Amino acid sequence: MKSQHSHVDDGYFEALLDNFRVGRAEGIDAAFEKYKLDALIMPTDLPPLQDGFYASTKAAAIAGYPMLSGRYFEFKISHDSAPDP
Amino acid sequence: MIPLSRHQDTAGPMCRSVTDAAILLSIIAGPDPRDEATLHQPGVRLRYTDALDVNALKGKRLGIPRGIINDVDEAIAQSFDAALRTLITLGAEIVDPADLQSSSEMLKPESEALVMTVDFKNDLNRYLSELVDVPTGVRSLAQVIDFNEKHADLELPLPYYTDQSQ
């Protein structure tokens, strides 16, 4: 219902710009530049009580950038998994 | 695929191996006029299978943004540390911490929540309106809310859902 009653207004566009600033320019883009990174990695954390969202997915979501998630057992790397030539 | 927010969602494959993910991603990636985000990607379509390389992690720098990580379950923390050791064994360099300048702002949900709240209605409405067949006849978020109220015994089971305010 909160979504149903929402509107695309100035506040929405300000929030969108704010997300890109926080997520990209002063977030992931800046960290990649500062630390010369190829990727960020993190464990899945416990959701905060406040809004129930995981912080570990937040950075990529705010930036609109892709992320990978996987369950770690043991990296199994073998030549069987290489592509056909 | 049901959208949540066009500005925050990223579609991708779910697979049992990196190779499978590369194969599937090579097929589903590419420009789609009905998915604006895909029109902003580089024009060259990549074959992700070409990038499969057991030595790919050699010399790669992986940062851990500690400032945005909440409490972590002990079992997950141990598993993460084991994964780090494996990544190092494979030649990666771990940068820890690699904090984001915007860490404190990122943990405040207002802007993210507002964009998601507005996008959800618009993106879900478009998704539902374009479906070929909907057995319930539900074609918009407003109709979803209405449907749930009319079938509250099934759709809003207590004590988990007392209303649809969120």
Image (cartoon, coloured by chain):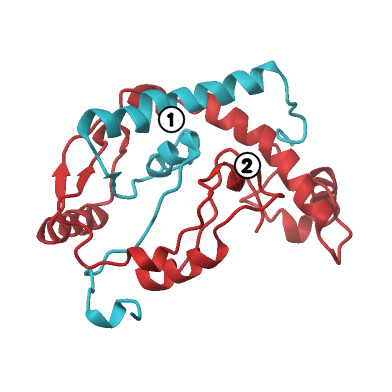
Q: Chain of mark 1?
A: A
- Quick check: can you spot residue B13? yes
- Marks 1 and 2 in Cβ contact (< 8 Å): no
| Relative height, residue B108 to residue B130 (above, below) | above
Q: Chain of mark 2?
A: B
User: Which quadrant would residue A3 be assigned to in this image?
Assistant: top right
Most extreme residue toward the right is B137
Amino acid at pointer 2: Arg
Give the percent coordinates (x, y) of residue B119: 67, 37
Where is mark 1, residue-wise?
A23
What element does badge 1 sit on? helix
Q: Which chain wears cyan?
A: A
Q: Is residue B118 left or right of residue B149?
A: left
Q: Residues within 10 Å of mark 2 (few under 14, many from 20)?
A: some
Residue B152 or A44: which is nearer the viewer?
A: A44
Give the percent coordinates (x, y) of residue B98: 22, 34
- Quick check: can you spot residue A48? no
Q: Which chain wears red?
A: B
Amino acid at pointer 1: Gly
> Disc 1 to disc 2, how far (Cα)?
15 Å
Q: Residue at x 58, y 22 (%)?
A: A15
User: Which quadrant would residue B135 be assigned to in this image?
Assistant: bottom right
Q: Residue at x 71, y 33 (%)?
A: A2
Where is mark 2, residue-wise?
B6
Give the percent coordinates (x, y) of residue A66: 45, 47
Q: Residues within 10 Å of mark 1 (few under 14, many from 20)?
A: many
